[in-house]
Amino acid sequence: MDLDSDQIALALPLPWQEQLWQRFNQRLEQGRLPHGVMLSGPSGIGVERLATAFSQRLLCNAEMSKYACGSCKGCKLLMAGTHPDLSILEPADVGKGILIDSVRNLTARLGKTAQQGGWKVALISPAEAMNESSCNALLKSLEEPQSKTLLILVSHRASLVPATIRSRCQIDHLSVPDLQVARQWLVEVAGEQQAVDQSLELAGGKPLLALEYMQSDSIEQRHMFEQLVDNIRLGDLSPMSAAQQVQKLNSDQMLDWFMHYLHRLVTGEMQNSLNPALFEFGDQLRKARGWALSGSNINPQLMWEGLFMDWLKVFRSPR
């Protein structure tokens, strides 16, 4: 689908993305841009923002600018959400898959001449939301690309993207930025140092996730979730009741919080009395998160009941 006005804003790379941004500009200037780029990195560090900045830079008509200029015809179309040569492919709903018909419609658009006479750009996010059929439908655009056409794939779990897609893309990996760089950026954007430090700690050093926590009630929600997990561990709350409380919430986010909670537990409170079952449970959380991110049609209530029952067993089994 085309991006509309409330989804498009001119984006700049974040401070920890400058090196990758410079490489992108060098490739563009030297005519060495591949036809497929995959930006891979955890959610919450600005991977989508960098992908947007790349696309806007390509569609900007100011040749000498290192960034989208904001004043040319291309940029005005971008800001209005009406640029005909920019498309985005994403799930219709959070946690759902990208369907084959949507991919076919995209490849048909990419096969046509650019309406503005320059680049044609498609953003696919997250790439792991495509199933096998959708990926196969995309292959032809990667194998037989049109000139001045760029496919930008965003992936938070590149291992879930088929090798047939990954092998046809230039993959750039983004990692969680240095803590001091993230802290300085957050202080400039959001202000108060104490809230920044607390949010960064809860977000595992991911600056955009920390900013989201600061601008919403996510910190309170996370504390409530961790209290719920504690109550199960202590035997004060049944797995069934706990599952009922969280089954309508964002499973991916809850699983991420659970994994961070478990990490803090094994490196802090329980580091001198580790139970091997904790590590086995960590594997279960990673598998569950893979299911959640893959768009599989899972029943959240049953998933959480199973996880919480196994979580209780970790503390009831012989050590």
Image: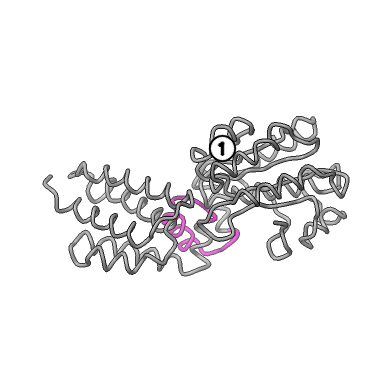
Q: Residues within 10 Å of mark 1 (few under 14, many from 20)?
A: some
Q: Residue at x 19, y 53 (%)?
A: 313
How many callouts does the rendering have?
1
Give x and y (percent) for residue 233.
21, 59
Question: Which SS type dominates the magenta stretch?
Answer: helix
Say if residue 19 shows up in the picture.
no
Q: Amino acid at mark 1?
A: His
Relative placement, left or right, of 303 versus 33 is: left
Q: Which residue is mark 1?
A: 173
Relative placement, left or right, of 80 versus 88 is: right
Q: How is the image coloured?
A: one colour
The magenta-colored residue range is 188-208
Give x and y (percent) for residue 86.
75, 51
Q: Residue at x 69, y 31 (%)?
A: 143
Q: Quadrant of residue 127?
A: top right
Assign the N terminus to one quadrant of the image. bottom right
